Image (tube, rainbow, N blue to C red):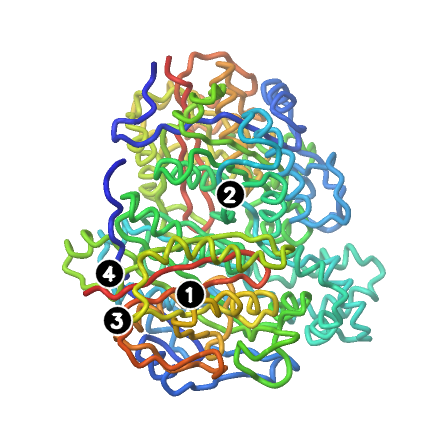
Amino acid sequence: MASTRDKSGRPVVVVTGMGVVTSLGAGKEDNWEKLTAGKSGIRAIKRFSTEGLKTRIAGTVDFVPVDPLTSPALAGKLADMAAEEAVAQSGIGSKGQFPGPLFLAVAPVEVEWPQRMEVAKASGANDQVSYADLIRAAASGRFKHYHDRFQFSSVADALLTKFGTEGAPVSLSTACASGASAIQLGFEAIRRGETDAALCVATDGSVNVESLIRFSLLSALSMSNDPPEGASKPFSKNRDGFVMAEGAGALVLESYEGAKARGAKILGVLAGCGELADSFHRTRSSPDGKPIVGCMRNALDDAGLTPADIDYINAHGTSTPENDKMECSCVITVFGERAKKIPISSNKSMIGHTLSAAGAIEAVVTLLTLEHQRIPPTINYNIPDPTITLDVVPNAARDAKMQRAISNSFGFGGQNVSLVLALEPA
Amino acid sequence: MAEAPREAWITGIGIVSCLGEGLDAHWQGFADKTRVIDAESFPPFIVHPLAPIDFDKQIPKRGDQRQMEPWQRIGTYAAGLALDSAGAKGNTALLGRMDMIVAAGGGERDEAVDAAIMSELPKAAKPDQFLNDRLMSDLRPTLFLAQLSNLLAGNVSIVHGVTGSSRTFMGEELASIDALQITLGRIASGQSDITLVGGSYNAERSDAVMLYEFGGYCLEGEFRPVWEREPKGGFALGSLGAFIVVESRTHAQGRGVKPIARLSAATSGYSSRTNPHGIENELARLWTRIAPALTLDGAAVISGASGAAQATAAERQFLSQHPELPVRATATLIGHGIEPQMVMNVALAAMAVNRGTLFPPCGGASFEQPMERPLKQVVVTGVGHWRGEGLALVEAVD
C-alpha cells in the first residue's frame, strides 16, 4: 500500500472530486468527450456588440443564464456549478458542510458599464456627467446591491454560504496562473496539517466589452475572427494571440490518509507545486527563461521527481507568439533531449484562455488525461512553427501510457506556477 | 511533521499614510494626534490623503512610475521601505528566494475617460458602437496593468527584485487578514523562511468613494473618531501603504538581523453577518486562540475598527468584555485603507511593542484609555466592513 506521507514526512495530497465548466459544456463527461474529439468552444461574441472591435470572438459560456449579467455574477454561477460537481463526486462532508477551507481564484471585480450608466442616469445629471454625480447617486441608498455585487469577496461569500466551507475563504489572483495558485494554497494548507481537506475553485466570467478591449489594447488577443474555432492555434507558426474565454474548475483536495480512511475514490495525486516570479517585465517573460525553468524545476523538486519521471505536459500554450516560444524553449531546457519525446498539448486550443480559471480547469483535464490514458490534442495545428520542435499532439487525440504529468500556468506580472499531477501509486 | 512551530519575527516595516512615511513619522503622528483629512475633494465625504512622498526614493525609474497608478506606487514604495528596514534591499540572492503575499483591491479608473463616455453615450446614435470606439481610442493600453490587482506584486518584483513567489489576495479587509494568517502558517511550518507581506490603498479617488457609498459606508459631514460615528457610522477611506518582512527566527539570526517584534499569532474568521451576534461570537472564537498567551498587565489592543456601523458596534461590544486592555483604533488618525489595513495595524503594533509604550488614545476618550505601564503584547483586530474577521498577536522580543 502506498504511503500517506512523502519522503519528507509531509502528508500526501490527493484529489477526490473534480468539476469543470467551459464553453464546451458543463461537467467532466461532456468536456472530456469534446476535448478528445478536438472540438472548439470559441465562437462569435453575441453578448455585446463587437462593432468596430478588432477581436470579435471568445469562448463565452452562453448556456448558463445569469440575469442581470455581470462578470462576478457569471463567475459565481460557473464556480458554483464546478464546485457542486467536485463536492458531489468526492462525497466528502455533508450537504452544506464541507470540512475544510475555500481557496478561490477569481478575476478582479469592478463596476461595469451597464451599471455605471444606470447610476449616471439615476443621478439626474444632464449633459455633463461626472463622478461627483455618481457619488451623489450612490448616496441615495438605491444601489446597495451594487456594493455587495462588486466586492471582491462576493463570489467567495456565495460559495462559502452554499458549501459551508470552514473559516475565512481566500480570494486570490495571480492573473493567468490564479487557478494553479488556488490549488497550491489548498495543497500547502493540507501539508501544514491545518486541514484534511480543501475546496479549490477557480472561475472567470470576464468576457465583457471593457475587459476584451483592455486585452486587445495590449495586442494580446487573436484577431483571426473567421472562423472563430480556428483562432486559438498554440504552437502554430501563424498563431496571433490568445482567445479570451470563460469557465470554472474545482478540485476537492484531501490528505491521502483522510481520503483512504473514509474510503474515497482517489482521482489522482497532487505530487508537487512549484512557483517562481519573474522580475523582467509586466507582460513579458525574462528572455533567458530562468523563471519558467526554475518554476518547473521547483515543482519537480517539490514532488521529489526528476524530468525523467514526467510522461505528459499540459501546456500553458496560450497561442501568443511569445508564450509558446518561451514555453517551448524552457521545456527543452528542463527536459533536455527527452523534451521532444514527451507529448505536450494545449487545452486552450479548444477552450480558449479561461484566464483566472485556466490553471484549475487544466489541472482537471490533466487528471482526466491520466485517468483515460488519452491525450487531448492541440487543434488548429496546420502550419507548424519550425522553431517549436516539440510533440504537440497535433489535431487528434492520442492514447498513451502515462503515470505523471506537469501542468503549467504563467501570467502577467511575472506569475509562474507549475503543478505535478500523478495517478495513485499501485 | 511533529516539529515545533518555528518562531516568526517581524524584521522589516515599511509604512506610509497621511501621517508621513516610516515608523518615526507615525510615532510622532500618533503622539500628537495629528489630524490630516480632506473634506473638500469628495463632498460630503471625508478621506485621509497620502502625505507628500518622493516616489523617486524607492522607485528610481520614472518609466516604472509611469506604469503604475497611485495605489501601485504607494505599495511599491512601502515595500521598498520594508526591504530597506529588513536589510534586504539589493540582496539579490535573498530577494530571489523571498516569498511575497500582497493584499490588493482593484485599481483606479481613468475618471476623465469615464466621465466623457457617460456624458456622450446617451446622445450617441449607436450607443454600443460608440462605447466600443471610445474605449478603443481613449483607454491607455498601460492603464489595464496599472489597475490589475496582481500587478502591485508584479511591480514589487520588477522594482525591488522579490521573486521567490508572488501571490495576491483579494476580498477587501480579509485580503491582509488571510495574507498574515498564511504567511505565519508557512513560516511556522517551514514552507517559507522569509516573506514580504502587505498592500496599499489609494483613497483619493471617486470610484472608491462611489463603491463604498453604494452601501452607505463612507463617513460624511463632520469628522469624528471611529467610536463616535453612530448611528449611521462610516469610515473615512485612507490612502496608505504597509508592508512587513516576516522571517523565521533562525533565518533572521542566520543573517544577523534583529527583530522589531514577534508575530505570534494571525487568525482569520468569517461570521454570519445576519446573526446579530455573529461578529462578537467569531471574535470570541478567535480570541480563545490568543488568550492563553496574554499577560494582561502588559497587553493592549490595536483595533482595526473602521467606523462601519455594524462592524464597529460589534467590535466595541466584544472589546468591552476585556476592559483591562487599553484600545487604540488607528483609523481615527490614518483612515481605513481596506485591503492592507490589518498589515498596517500589525506594523503599528510592532512599532509600539518595540518601543515598549502604547501611543496615546487616538480619540473617543470614553473608550480609549491611557496606558502608563510598559507594553509587551498587542492584540490586533480586523473586522471587515462587510465580511471577515481576524485577530493577530504581536509581541516584544526580549
Which residue is label 3 attached to? B354
Above or below, A349 relative to B125: above
Identify the subunit bearing mark 4: B
Same-chain status of marks 2 and 1: no
In the image, what residue occupies the spot 57% across and 38% down?
A353
Residue located 25% across and 63% down the image: B86
Q: Which residue is mark 1?
A: B75
Q: Are marks 2 and 3 in contact (CB under 8 Å)?
A: no
Name the residue type under label 3.
Answer: Asn
Task: Choose mark 2 or mark 4, whichever is in front.
Answer: 2
Residue visible at 46% across and 31% down?
A253
Disc 1: host chain: B
Task: Name which of mark 4 and mark 3 comes first in the sequence.
Answer: 4
- The chain carrying label 3 is B
Kindly tell me whether residue A241 is visible in this rendering: no
Give the Cα separation between the discs numbered 4 and 3.
Answer: 20 Å
Does dot 1 land on a helix, a strand or a loop? helix
Q: Label 1, label 4: how many angstroms apart (C-alpha)?
A: 17 Å
Distance Cα–Cα, label 2 vs label 1: 31 Å
In the image, residue A117 lies at what x, y percent?
76, 63
Q: Horizontal and vertical percent for residue A136?
A: 72, 75
- Residue A63, compared with residue A399, is above or below; it is below
Asked if labels 2 and 3 share a chain, the reply is no
Judge depth for marks 1 and 3 and give the one in front. 3
Give residue B90's position: percent from left, percent from top: 24, 61
